[in-house]
Amino acid sequence: MKKTLAILVTLTMVLLLLAACNGDSKDDGPQLVGISMPTQTSERWIMDGNALKDILVDKGFEVDLQFAGDVISTQQQQITDMLERGARVLVIAAVDGSRLSSVLEQAARDGVYIISYDRLLVDTEAVSYYATFDNVKVGELQAQSLIDGLNAKRGAPPWNIELFAGSPDDTNSFFFFSGAMNILQPYIDRGDIVIPSGLTDQNDVGTLRWDGDLAKARMEKELAEFYNDGKALHGVLSPYDGLSRGIITALKNFGFEPGTDNWPVVTGQDAESESIALIRSGEQFSTILKDTRDLAAVAANMVVAVLQGLELEINDTTTYHNNIKFVPSYLLVPYSVDASNYRQLVIESGYLSEDDIG
């Protein structure tokens, strides 16, 4: 009896070990990486998501790429689904960087690495690393291009300008605006720049969800209220190409004519194909190129490093505080693009083709 019982115990242990070896395991097959992008309404996020996916697939990972349609609850659910599928790393460009804390903290407790992509995830310890551009520098470049355009096209100051900022729920908006004001505030203080609307606080000039229609409506309102007596509008600080196009439409509707001396200097960001066409035609003065291919490569290297235990390249540990901690970051260099250099920076670099611009 004792011998039979011992044999049964041994067989049971063998079967349990076999089940453990052959059962469902998150380590079987390619490791899953979840990529969560905020929207497909902006050309750049489509390019970001696809570029990152292509790199990771080439490196042998399984990738789940989702776009949240600018809806917070959709992004939360998509991330939850990725985790249930066994994602070991999440790369997230948030719709609202403050609204994902609970799901991310549980993921971190389960050993999932979380990489904040271009938009900083805030109010959570869970974020592991941050891949982005020098976003203060982005704002400084936008403002400097506005000054350069005003000097070139509108003569000596004083200049009348209006200020636009990005979405209040996007942490980058604050870095862009603070960078821009680093350049513009001295001009405002000495009277070289005048803001006829009086709107200079980011809370007053923010544009929810980076919505071009909201920018168009606000520009139309300000034109009717502050420029209806023939006052000149010399320039507009716009932090994103989609807003710039809405602003340009409002300017045209009000009677400003591109190519004439009264056409304002309008800035932008993201080097979207429609706006490169507007720069070429003289309707938009400038944009900022943030090469998504480079950012995707940095984020992909982070994924490989954390999953394979390799040394991870970081070049900033003191700039980006997410209200809980300084997040180890890699910052890339942005470039100012205008009619003088768009061909070299955007076309010859392969970022966009002539067919893309049309």
Image: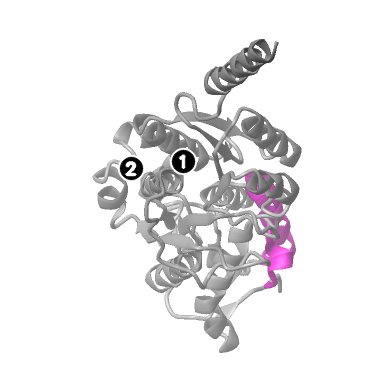
- Magenta stretch: give its range: 200-229
Indicate the position of residue 28 as horizontal and vertical percent values.
49, 25
Q: Is 73 on the left-hand or right-hand side of 33?
A: right
- Residue 322 appears in the picture as rendered: yes
Residue denoted by label 1: 48
Indicate the position of residue 318 as horizontal and vertical percent values.
51, 73
In reply to whether residue 201 is colored magenta, the answer given is yes
Indicate the position of residue 59 as horizontal and vertical percent values.
35, 34
Q: Residue at x 52, y 22 (%)?
A: 21
Q: Residue at x 73, y 66 (%)?
A: 203
> Neighbour class for label 1 at 10 Å: few (<14), some, many (≥20)?
many
- The amino acid marked with disc number 1 is Asp
Indicate the position of residue 277 as horizontal and vertical percent values.
40, 43
Q: Which of the 4 image quadrants contains residue 175?
A: bottom right
Residue denoted by label 2: 351
In reply to whether residue 19 is colored magenta, the answer given is no
Out of 37 and 40, give the one closest to the viewer.
37
Q: Residue at x 45, y 48 (%)?
A: 306
Gap between marks 2 and 1 measured at Cα? 12 Å
- Residue 228 appears in the picture as rendered: no
| Foreground label between 2 and 1 | 1
Mark 2 / mark 1, whichever is N-terminal: 1
Out of 81 and 22, give the one closest to the viewer.
22
Q: Is 107 on the left-hand or right-hand side of 314?
A: right
Disc 2, disc 1: CB below 8 Å?
A: no
- The amino acid marked with disc number 2 is Tyr
